[in-house]
Image: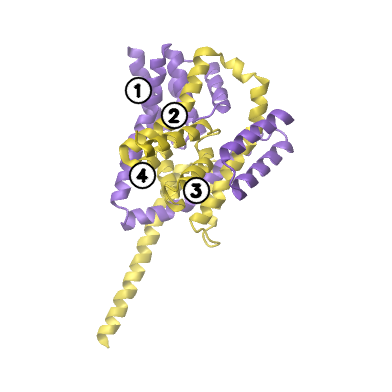
Amino acid sequence: MTVYLKLIWAYLKIGLFGFGGGYAMLALIEREVVAPGWITKQMFTDIVAISQMTPGPIGINSATYIGYVVTGSVLGSIITTLTVTLPSFLLVLYASHYIRRHRESTVIKGIFAGLRPVVIGLIASAALLLMNKQNFPDYTISIAICAASFCLVYFTKIHPIFIICLAGLVGLIVY
Amino acid sequence: MNNLYFKLFWTFLKIGAFTFGGGWAMISIIEREIVDKHRWINKEEFLDLLAVSQSLPGILAVNISVSIGDRLRGLKGSIVAALGTILPSFLIILAIAVFLTPDIIKNNPVVSKIFMGIRPCVVALIIAPVLSSARAAKITWKTVWIPIAVAVLIYVGCSPIVFIIIGGLGGYLWLSHKQKLAHDELNKRNNDNDRQ
């Protein structure tokens, strides 16, 4: 029983203090689950590798995996997955309602006017950070896949999900 | 079952099942589904919801789905959208944890090859919304330095939170200054009219 409470506490903290999404949260997750000795450093590295090879947010992936491994039950993984999403779920709901109520105020209008160009910069930084050796191991085929995918998603009406599948197929054939 | 709830769940289930490489990679798919296909919200509003989602802690993908679900159908909508986003990765990871060992996935040559193709594609899926959002936010040659500076500074290691705070505060000061100028102008004109 106590292990469930400890897991809930750890994942509440991860959900509440994990800023910046995805890989920025990894350091926090590591501190909360490797340091108490729930999983080994090697297992944590495995979870990160699996998260990169499966869809979905890495925060959810790690919560589901660790919840199951630590408790040995599906219930454990359900609890950790729901716990990690709960704090931000409540915060986003509260913020959304507050903003809708004060939509016409100078404060909210001004904040959003200032945030819009910043958010575009944030998305651009995410793209820049992913332009690394791991995503582009060669400087030929991978760049061609990236350029072709960009043209398809930006200039055509082809669905991004189809483009992802196509890129996976191309990877399977050419590598 | 209400049709829109089902549509919302199905849409975010697809989004959750094809989000590789973190929350930002969802944006292209969400934009196509929510803004272009269903027309549930417009582009500018989408950008504002992104701003809220990014400004708060937690998992970006979940935050985005909660804010869009709430915008469309309140609390129930946000629960449906969040569950849709979470469910695919939950089921896949659980299946791996229960039935497989990490090594089977990690060292599988077929999976590795597929992902060598998907990873550069994901980068393209993040570049595309940068350009389309810049158009929606009416970024001009006068304001384009802001996203560029933010992107470069985060790239070299600055914290994103700093820019969210500066952006919000700066936007508020800029708008209240602009409104004050307009207000003063109006007063001046009224005074001139009175004198005449």
Q: How many marks?
A: 4
Where is residue A78? Give x, y as percent.
39, 20
Q: Earlier in the sequence, mark 4 or mark 2?
A: 4
C-alpha separation, residue under disc 4 versus residue under disc 1:
30 Å
Left or right placement of residue A59 versus residue B181 in this view? right
Q: Residue B21, position in %: x, y?
A: 55, 33
Q: Which mark is residue B105?
A: none
- Alpha carbons under labels 4 and 3: distance apart: 17 Å
In the figure, is residue A107 to the left or right of B163? left
- Residue where numbered disc 3 is placed: B36
Can residue A78 be seen here? The reply is yes
Circle 1 residue? A9
What's the residue type where badge 3 is placed? Asp
Q: Which residue type does callout 1 highlight?
A: Trp
Front label number (1 vs 2): 2
Q: Chain of mark 4?
A: B
Do the residues indicated by labels 3 and 2 lie within the same chain of the protein?
yes
Determine which residue is flagged by label 4: B71
Q: Are marks 4 and 1 on the same chain?
A: no
